[in-house]
Amino acid sequence: MLEDLVRQNRSYRRFEQQVPVGLDTLRSLVDLARLSASGANLQPLKYILVTDRDACAEISPQLGWAAYLKDWPGPAEGERPAAYILILGDREIRKEFGVDPGIAAQSIMLGAAELGLGGCMIASINRQALRASLSIPEHLEILLCLALGKPQETVVIEPVGRDGDIRYYRDADGVHHVPKRSLDKLIWKSI
Ligand SMILES: Cc1cc2nc3c(=O)[nH]c(=O)nc-3n(C[C@H](O)[C@H](O)[C@H](O)COP(=O)(O)O)c2cc1C
């Protein structure tokens, strides 16, 4: 069921790094993005698929992980993503990319969840460094980085408490908790 997949599709930031994710898998995930909606059907997104160990090692330090977890600098060696999909916007096709990258990212992440994989959409990127290390030309804007792998952490959804705090947190057992606002708080009105 779609609801099961959406519930399973949490942001995971720790992985079984030694479990590979193949290029064929990444291609099949990008194919889901290819089939998704695009403003004016301009399809301005481009993708870089990364499974190579050395390339993965170059990407990881250029990402900002879990800003609310102040004492956690990001995944350590052994728990890093096994693959990445970079979502780029081709400025030769369009100057603004609207919600296209979000739609593409969600299609990819749902597809990954269906395969038993998981990951995290990351917008906090040292773009200059990443552009240099992957030789990304200037006309391709770096929009999002999707970290992917076999998750090695438990993530649970919680209701937002009375204090209204939406910050995710990790408990003493390493379980990651994500507060979600209630449906009634989201629906402004029903007419
Ligand atoms: C557009 C976007 C950008 C994000 N950027 C980052 C990021 O830079 N670093 C990170 O660790 N998580 C990032 N996330 C993941 C969010 O923190 C995560 O979606 C949120 O905590 C809710 O958790 P959930 O995805 O499990 O529902 C991003 C998510 C979205 C949708």
Image (cartoon, helix red, strand yellow):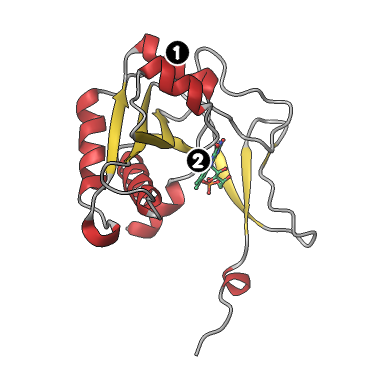
**Disc 1 residue type (three-letter):** Ala
Nearer the N terminus, badge 1 or badge 2? 2
Q: In which quarter of the image is residue 38?
A: bottom left
| Res 105 seen here | yes
For the residue pair 187 and 50, the one nearer the viewer reads as 50
Q: What is the residue that sits farthest to the top in this orientation?
A: 54
Residue 93, position in %: x, y? 26, 46
**Which type of secondary structure does the marked residue at label 2 adopt?**
loop
Residue 109, position in %: x, y? 37, 43
Q: What is the residue that sits farthest to the bottom in this orientation?
A: 191
Q: Which of marks 1 and 2 is in front?
A: 1
| Res 80 seen here | no
Q: In this view, does 151 lie above or below 30?
A: above
**Which type of secondary structure does the marked residue at label 1 adopt?**
helix
To which residue does mark 2 refer? Answer: 11
Residue displayed at 58% across by 30% down:
64
